[in-house]
Each structure stands twice: as C-alpha cells, then as structure tokens.
Image (spheres, helix red, strand yellow):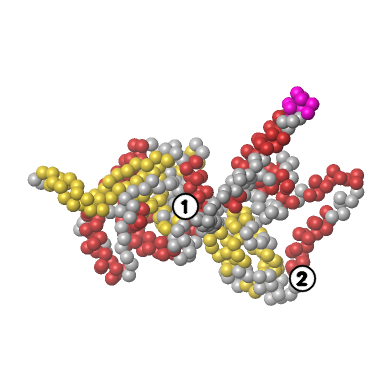
C-alpha cells in the first residue's frame, strides 16, 4: 500500500488558485483513476477534478469553500490491493492533531509567557479565521511580519472576493497603522489628557457603513460567484487601462447577400447554422496580422507581442452572466472551421461544459452586441489584452453609393463596429486604422466566394 498526495492541478496559464466547491467523494470511498473527485472553481470556470490514481480516498485535506493554491495537497489516496485496510488515515492526520496537543501544555509555565506568541504562530498555516474568512499566504506572511494578530486581521476591511483581504488592503492598513503611534505620541507630548487619542484608531479601522434601508417594494438579490468575479474583473480592467473607443460604420450588403445564398446548403451539408460571427472573426484575424501591435499585452513597461492569434468570443449565459471562450489560432481556420468552432464553444458555454483551457490565452476579443438588437456598444477590455471589438445589429439604411453613372442613394445593410483599446500602448491612429481595416475586409467580401 502507498499513500499518494493529490494536489490542486494547474488549470490554465494564469490560474494560481482554485476554490473547492463540492467534494463528489467521501473518505473511504473507492475511486478509479480519472474519476471526478471534486468540483473546483477558478477565476475563469467551474470544473471537475479527476483522481490522479486509483485507490481509496483516505483523507480530505481541504474543506468546501477553501481557496487552495495550485500545487497544494487537497487529498490523500491510498493505492494498492490492500488500500482499503485502515491505519493510513491516522498517519496522515497525526501531524495535524499533534500540533495542538503539543502546544496546549506550553502556556502553563508563567516564566515562558513570551513563548506563547511563538507557539501560536502556526495559525497562519491554516489561513482561515474563526469567522470563516480565508486569508492568502501572502496576507498571512505580511500579518506575521508586522505582528498583526488574527483578531486584528479580522477587523481589516477586505475589498477582494467574498470580502477577502488582499495585498493592497494590507498595504493601506499598515500605512494607517504605522501612522497611528506617531499621532498618539504627538498628542501625549502636548496634552496630559489624551482626549484626541481615539481618532487615530477610527482612521486605522474605519467604521462600517450603516446598513441601507429599503421599503417593501424592493427585492434584494445576492450576486452569485460568477457575477462577483465579472464585477471584480471589469472594475480592475477600467482601473488598469485607460479606455478609448473608436467607431466605424461598415456596409455589409455583400456579406448578407452571400450568407443568405449559402446558409441552407451549409445547414444541409454540415448540420450547423452559419451565422455572421465567424465572418467577423475571420476579418478581425486578418486585421490582426496586418496590425500586429494590436495583438499584444502589457507587462509593466514591457510590451509582449503575441505570435498566435487567439480570439475570444463573448457568450451570454442563460443565467445572465458572461463568459469568453477562446478560438486558438483563429487565423488558421477557414470559414467552415470557424463556424464549427464558434458553434461548439457557444453550445458548451451555455451548458457549463467548458474546460479551463477553453478560456485561456486569448489575445483579442469580439463581442456581438447586435445579437441583442443593439446598434453599438463600448466594450470593456479583457485583461491583459489591449483591444476588444463590439459589432452591432445589421440594419437596412439608405446610403450613398458610387455607380458608373454617378452617386445614388440605395438601401444597404449597415453595421457599426466599436473598437475599445488600451490608450497606454495603443494610440488613436492605430486603434482607428485597425477598426477601419476590419470594416474594409467586411465591405470587400467576395459575394461569389465558394464555401466548400
């Protein structure tokens, strides 16, 4: 028999931790290799984690709701023919239970009272307070170095997900905390009765806002986990990148005529629906090759130019939330391949069957606000990308066209393209030319193009 540690797997390039949503197996359950053991949520997607080995689940090391860094142990699996025999669990749990037993007698000698904080210091290893709020290892290390007790840590307001305290919260709190003794000392030096002493405490730990009151004509709905993540990421994107949006109106008459001509044959032959979305993605991919400085990300003062063109597609979910699966190497597909890829990702997104890899490594994003009847929008950039394009509804409008006999007014299929970009690295000239180039590819679409 052997004991194997099952660890939190890496579920995407930028994913550093996962939240345990639900254990699908119990202790002493038999599990097969690659059988789903638990459900984990990341910043991008919820997914099932399979067992790395076959055997018996001997210990669950993290509880539901815990946030676990990638690579940390989450369970112990006993492998081998006699794995079902007991005895392994006490060996696994002994270190966890022995620590409190060893620390209990230590406070008894009065002379060693100064040793008590040292013995209590293993508490940050759990990173979970009595209230149930989770603290990351980084926050716990900062608290330990600054001599902040768990009780004091509990009073620090958090701005992260589920009111979690992040690095910025700690820095802001420590700045106020370090200023507090100076203020108190100056007050004590000038006045025997420190009347103003409570003021710095109030500054260090701001009083919570009074609860808002509502009448009986409202309904209070708590955000779900995905909506909280979306809100956090949208605010972070606006805080990170100065957004500029350029607008272009494009004549899509050729695209509409061509699609209407081939969509029935496509449905019959491929069993899929041909929408306008893959045509938009094809035009964006071509424009990204023409303007590679739109296919970049920012790392401090460095610009990372991406060689792969991976286009994200914003998909609205039945819950009302939004998710962005990615078409990798979009420039290497023909329209048939793009159509199948778009339909597959959209279908799996709505059925909550996307994997973390389906959401990773996007370099540019498309949002089709026209599917909701909107003529244009000002989309928010998906960090760390520097650009996103929204396409509006295609509408029939009178437009001036050039003919052999002169200008004329005709009914055309028109659409607005809205291009938001990061003004730190993309100026108006590049952002505007890119949007115009996408429109040019759509306007010059070959109405006689062969699909197969």
- Residue at 85% over, 43% down: 114
In the image, the segment drawn in magenta is 184-193
- Residue at 26% over, 48% down: 250
The numbered mark, 2 or 1, whose residue comes first in the sequence reads 2
Classify mark 1: helix, strand or loop: loop
The overriding secondary structure of the stretch rendered in magenta is helix
The image shows residue 344 at horizontal and vertical percentages of 40, 64
The image shows residue 393 at horizontal and vertical percentages of 30, 53
Q: Quadrant of residue 115?
A: top right
Whether residue 352 is visible here, answered yes or no, is yes
Looking at the image, which residue sits at the far top? 190
- The crowding category of the residue bearing disc 1, from other C-alpha atoms within 10 Å (few below 14, some 14 to 19, many at least 20), is many
Magenta-colored stretch includes residue 383: no
Q: Quadrant of residue 204?
A: top right
Q: Say which quadrant the N terminus sits in.
A: bottom right
- Residue at 50% over, 36% down: 301
In this picture, residue 385 sits left or right of residue 187: left
Looking at the image, which residue sits at the far front? 216
Q: Say which quadrant the C terminus sits in.
A: bottom left
In this picture, residue 2 sits left or right of residue 415: right
For label 2, the residue is 87
- Residue at 33% over, 40% down: 432
Pick the residue in front: 169 or 19.
169
For label 1, the residue is 361
Q: Quadrant of residue 98?
A: bottom right
Say which mark, if any, is on residue 41: none
Q: CA distance from mark 2 to mark 1?
A: 45 Å
- The crowding category of the residue bearing disc 2, from other C-alpha atoms within 10 Å (few below 14, some 14 to 19, many at least 20), is few
- Residue 87 vertical placement versus 233 (above, below): below
Classify mark 2: helix, strand or loop: loop
């Amino acid at each position: 028999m052997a004991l194997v540690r099952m660890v939190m797997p890496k579920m995407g390039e930028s994913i550093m931790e996962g939240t345990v949503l639900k254990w699908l197996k119990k202790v002493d359950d038999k599990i097969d290799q690659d059988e789903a053991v638990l459900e984990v949520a990341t910043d991008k997607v919820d997914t099932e984690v399979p067992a790395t080995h076959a055997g018996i689940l001997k210990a669950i090391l993290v509880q539901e709701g815990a946030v676990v860094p990638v690579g940390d142990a989450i369970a112990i699996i006993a492998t081998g023919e006699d794995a079902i025999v007991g005895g392994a669990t006490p060996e696994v749990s002994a270190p966890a239970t022995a620590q409190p037993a060893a620390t209990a007698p230590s406070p008894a000698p009065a002379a060693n009272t100064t040793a008590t904080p040292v013995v209590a210091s293993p508490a940050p290893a759990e990173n979970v307070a009595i209230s149930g709020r989770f603290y990351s290892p980084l926050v716990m290390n900062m608290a330990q170095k600054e001599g902040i007790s768990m009780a004091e840590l509990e009073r620090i307001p958090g701005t992260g997900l589920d009111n979690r305290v992040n690095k910025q919260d700690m820095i802001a709190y420590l700045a106020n905390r370090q200023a507090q003794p100076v203020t108190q000392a100056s007050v004590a030096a000038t006045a025997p009765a420190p009347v103003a002493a409570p003021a710095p405490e109030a500054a260090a730990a701001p009083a919570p806002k009074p609860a808002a009151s509502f009448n009986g004509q409202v309904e209070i709905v708590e955000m779900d986990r995905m909506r909280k993540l979306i809100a956090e990421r949208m605010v972070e994107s606006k805080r990170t990148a100065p957004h500029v949006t350029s607008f272009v109106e494009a004549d899509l008459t050729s695209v509409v005529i061509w699609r209407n001509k081939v969509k029935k044959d496509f449905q019959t032959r491929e069993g899929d629906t041909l929408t306008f979305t893959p045509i938009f993605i094809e035009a964006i991919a071509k424009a990204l090759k023409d303007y590679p400085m739109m296919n970049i990300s920012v790392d401090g003062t460095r610009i990372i130019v991406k060689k792969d063109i991976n286009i994200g597609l914003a998909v609205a979910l039945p819950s009302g939330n939004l998710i962005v699966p990615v078409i990798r190497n979009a420039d290497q597909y023909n329209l048939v391949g793009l159509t199948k890829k778009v339909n597959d990702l959209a279908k799996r997104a709505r059925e909550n069957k996307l994997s973390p890899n389906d959401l990773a490594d996007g370099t540019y994003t498309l949002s089709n606000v026209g599917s909701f009847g909107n003529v244009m929008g000002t989309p928010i950039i998906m960090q760390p990308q520097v650009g996103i394009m929204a396409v509006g509804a295609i509408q029939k409008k009178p437009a001036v066209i050039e003919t052999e006999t002169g200008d004329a007014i005709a009914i055309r299929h028109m659409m607005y393209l809205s291009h938001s970009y990061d003004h730190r690295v993309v100026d108006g000239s590049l952002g505007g030319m890119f949007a115009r180039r996408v429109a040019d590819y759509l306007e010059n679409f070959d109405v006689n193009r062969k699909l197969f």
